[in-house]
Structure formats: C-alpha cells, structure tokens
Amino acid sequence: MKKSFSLFLLAFLLVFISSDLLWAKVYIDIRSPSFRKFPIAIFPFKSPLHPNEDMKLGERATDILNSDLSLSGFFALLDSKNLGEAVIKPPPGETSTGTGQGLMGTSAEVIDFRSWANTGAEALVMGEVNYKDRSLTLEARLYDVLKQELIIGKRYIGEITDLSRMVHRFADEIVFALTGEHGFFQTKIVFVSTPTGNKEIYLMDFDGRNSRQITRHQSICLSPRFSPDGTKIAFTSYKAGNPDIYIRNLRNGEERRISYYPGLNISPAWSPDGQRLALTLSKDGNPDIYTVNQDGSGLLRLTDHPAIDVSPTWSPDGKKIAFVSNRGGNPQIYIMNAQGRDVQRLTFEGNYNTHPAWSPRGDRIAFDASVGGNHNICTIRPDGSDFRILTANLGRCEMPSWSPDGRNLVFSSSRDGGPHIFLIDAEGTRIKRLTFQKGGDTYPNWSPRFNE
C-alpha cells in the first residue's frame, strides 16, 4: 500500500474527447430484467519493448484483463483464438507492418471495424505494454465497434510490479464506461493464512494476485476487517496471550491494541462511518455484543443475555446490527437496532448458522449454515424472506464477505482439501478459487473501493 501505489497510477486521457461525450451512453443496463452479457473482444496486448521474452508482459496483461471482465459477469468475452487478424487495415498506399508507430498512435480509421463486427463484438479493447529504463507503461483503448469510435483511452506509468494494478485500473474504466457503475477490480481481500505455521494476516488483490503477509505476531490472528476507507484493519490477536483487538494502519504499518479486557475480545466490525466498532466481549462473564470508539473509549453494551452473542455486522445505513446468538438453543442469526433494542430472530433454516455479513446494498445478509447436507454459504433478506443456498458440493464453506458492489462474495472452503479462499457471484453461478499458497486460508474480508 506504500511505494509503488503512489507512483503507478499516473493515468490520463490520450485523446481530446470531452468527458460529456465519453460518458454520454450506458451500453449495458445491468439492472434490467432483460440484461444480456455484452459481447466484447480483447485483442492480445502488444509488448514490443522488453529485455526478456520470458516476461510476456502483453500476454500477462491480456490474461488479467480477460479474468477481470469475466469475473464481473457483465461481458461475453470472445475467444481470442477466433479473432483472426481483423485488427488494422493499413492506410491507403501503405503496407501493413503491424502497429508501426505504436498502438496509441494508431487512428480509429485504420481499425477494420467491419471485420470486428462480423465476429459479434460490440466493443473492442486493444493495448500495448512497454518496459524501458525500469519504467513500465501500459496504454489501452476501448472502442465502440458498431459506431467505429473510441470510448476511452488511458496510459498508466509505474514499476514492473505494477502491471496487474494497471490492468485492474483499466478494467474498472471499462466497466464504468459501459455500465455507468464502478467496478471492484482495484479492491483488496484480507484473510488469515498459515504458511508460516502461525495464523497471520495476509493481503491480496481481489483476484488472488500479489499476496503479501501483513502481521508477524507469531501467534493466532483472527477476523480481520477493513475500515470503511480501506486504510486500516481491525482484528483479534493472541499476541499478548489473550484474545485482544488491534487496529493496524495498512499505509504506515502502525499497530495499536484497542480492546484488551479479561476474557474474549473478538469479532470486530466497523460502523459504516468508521467511528465505532461492534465487537464481542466476555469481560462481564458471558459473551455479549458491545460497541466502542476506534481508540478503545466509549464502551457501550448492546446485548445482555445468558446466551452467547457474537459476530456482529452493521447494516450499510448504520441503523441495525445482525449477530449470532444461541439464545434459541442453537446458533442462529438475529437482528437488533444499533442501540441493542428490538432483537428479532432472522434465520430458521439450518441448525448452525454463523458469520453474518450484511450486503453493501442492504438488501441481503450472507452467512454460513449447516443446511442442505453440508455447511454452505447462504443469503437471506433482512426481513427473513427469500432464503437461498449459494454453494453445493464445495466442502465446508464459511465466513462470507461481500464485494463493495454487493454482486459477489468471498468465503473459505475445504473443497480442494484447503481451506482456501473462493469467490462466488451472488446468484451462486460463477465460482473461482483465489488462494493456492501452502497452509489454510480463512476469515476473508473484501475491502471497500479506495484509491491507493
């Protein structure tokens, strides 16, 4: 989150087209009941200048962009193997020799749009990656094939390690240009993993790339949660011998312990305004839900029940909190207002329901449940209707967390022997494994959108 983050995103428009023209049309109405995936072609990115053929910068950029747009669920990507050479027609009187002056110097008039239209494409992406003098440059354009015009053109400059971040940035530009909504390709996922033999916290790109270790407590870390601005995480650690809650600044590495009462200090959850955290404490004998300021002051008890109350999650408007309680005999999801009043049971299907996560849209709550013959990821409306099971035949699935647009979730699953982190769309139709490192991966939490 430091170093190259501030260096690489030097993006600017390459052509003189007004912003009004750029954003005048929404190509994909993703909220329409008649929504269809938008056919888009990604021509393999060129990479004419790099010192080592093994780097395959153009190929890597193409693969990342294909993966991003595929995971969005908005696009029908045309198979690049079937695209042929329907790329550029030489200007009159000239012979085609490739991109010549460089992709970004190529005018829209020389692209053979008719041939692209014949492939079924309605949009076309072309790009070029250059690495010279220890500087990486990614140039990319998005075209409207039917109108034969440029939609957006961008250039990103940074270090060699910034390639995936550059491509993620352009993928976000594509989604915004074609749908009018922001993508999630620049977001991060924080999780707990054990490759060192201890449970430490790691951070990775939303697609599993660029994983790095965040904590080195040489102990047990649990339940990391992003602050609403994405700059901090709250988590539980046994570093001092007791399960205490810490907050770590991801930009400067500063870490402080904010809750260290005797007994449990677990399952922190940020309020939507980032001012307070809900958490579970057992300092008064029984695990109950409390809230506290992020400096540890202002402790307020919300539940006071003989049962066990854990795992709070805020509604996006900050007015309600969902949590887990066994006050009905076995763990179920309950909802109360943010002051701890008007407690109501939400779930009745499944006999062991835990780890609720409220969607950023506010319309659904995800959780894991012992139901359907296994432990699955499920969702339900906050009024208790429309219960859905998203996972099947994926082993033990638990600890869901929503993407910032509320269209996808990450969770931990033992499907491949794991546990490992998987991504699934909110309808349960698209699944992708994200982590492959040694050890078990649990407690994923998806960041909000933020600029590094």
Image (spheres, rainbow, N blue to C red):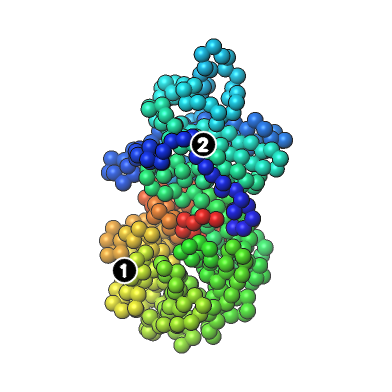
Question: Which mark identifies residue 272?
Answer: none
Q: How many marks?
A: 2
Seen in the image, is 447 located left or right of residue 55?
Answer: left
Q: x, y percentage for residue 416?
A: 55, 52
Residue at x 48%, y 72% (from the top left corner): 268
Quadrant of the rendered structure where residue 136 is? top right
Seen in the image, is 318 located left or right of residue 150?
Answer: left
- What amino acid type is highlighted by mark number 1? Leu
Q: x, y percentage for residue 73?
A: 41, 43
Label 2 belongs to which residue?
14
Q: x, y percentage for residue 285?
A: 46, 87
Q: Secondary structure at mark 1?
A: loop
Asked whether the viewer can see residue 359, the reply is yes
- What amino acid type is highlighted by mark number 2? Leu
Q: x, y percentage for residue 344?
A: 29, 73
Label 1 belongs to which residue?
346
Residue 267, compared with residue 183, is above or below; it is below
The mark nearer the N terminus, 2 or 1, is 2
Which one is in front, 177 or 201?
177
Quadrant where the N terminus lies?
Answer: bottom right
Residue at x 40%, y 53% (from the top left corner): 405
Q: Are marks 2 and 1 in contact (CB under 8 Å)?
A: no
Residue 291, compared with residue 41, is above or below; it is below
Seen in the image, is 346 located left or right of residue 76?
Answer: left
Residue 89, compared with residue 1, is above or below; it is above
Q: Secondary structure at mark 2?
A: loop
Quadrant of the rendered structure where residue 63 is? top right
Residue at x 54%, y 11% (from the top left corner): 93
Quadrant where the C terminus lies?
Answer: bottom right
Give the spatial CA distance, label 2 vs label 1.
Answer: 52 Å
Quadrant of the rendered structure where residue 44 is? top right
